[in-house]
Amino acid sequence: MKKIITIIICITTLTSCFYTAMYHLIEDDKKWLGAYKEGDVLLFTSKFGVDTMTITERKVVDKILPFVENESSDTFYANASINFTIKHSGSEISGWLIIVKKDDSITSLHIRIGDRQYNLDDTKHVVFSKKTRTVSTLDDVISVSTKNSELYIKSKYTPDIFYWSKSKGLIQYQYQTGETYNLYKILPHQKKN
């Protein structure tokens, strides 16, 4: 009888060490991060001046091994994010993009710039639009405005509208004053030897 109890305890202990479900990002999900690398600097120009956006962190959390680490859940949801800051008129505006794999076919998307946040429970329901740039037209652009986002605090440094391309990332934003900033150039992070 002692052996049976010991075996039951061992099995119970071991099964609690494994995820019961694991949801992994696919390559199409990762496209939301754009080609950004940590340390990249993007220049946005307007007739009012130049804003700089710096990618402060790029992170992909997608485990292969089924062992539970420090989570309180027995389900693993892969996720990825980029964090950035935009320097505008002496102020710094923070922002991020987060994707989370909710199950095998659902990926949620969250984009925030300043105090404006766009949330979508499933990227299959993204409404893309076309956005013409000086040289090309992108057809994978989300237009985020007062109609489809939340504004947490009204601030003159939170864009009223911004445009996020699935393949290129942030391409344009406009402040309440009408100042419109367009992506001009990406300065890739230079690795130090």
Image (spheres, helix red, strand yellow):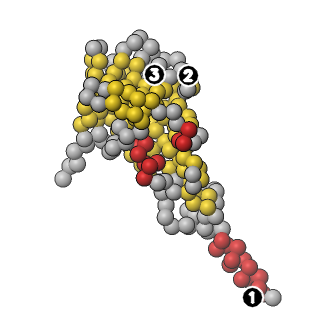
The mark lying in front, picked from 1 and 3, is 3
Q: Which mark is residue 161?
A: 3
Which residue ends up furthest to the top in the rendered image?
177
> Could you tell me which secondary element the residue under label 2 belongs to?
loop
Do the residues bearing badges 1 and 3 touch, measured as CB atoms within 8 Å?
A: no
Instruction: Report which residue position mark 2 lands on.
Output: 147
Counting residues from the N terminus, which is met first, the one under dot 2 or under dot 1? Answer: 1
**Which one is earlier in the sequence, the residue at label 1 or at label 3?**
1
Could you say which quadrant of the image residue 157 lies in?
A: top left
Image height check: is 149 above or below 189?
Answer: above
As measured in the structure, the alpha-carbon distance from the residue carrying label 2 to the one carrying label 1 is: 64 Å
Q: Nearer the viewer, residue 186 or 89?
A: 186
10 and 124: which is toward the camera: 124
Q: Is residue 10 left or right of residue 82?
A: right
- Residue 127 position, x and y percent, is 51, 33
Determine whether 164 is above or below 193 in the image: above
Give the image quarter of residue 10. bottom right
Per the image, the residue denoted by label 1 is 3
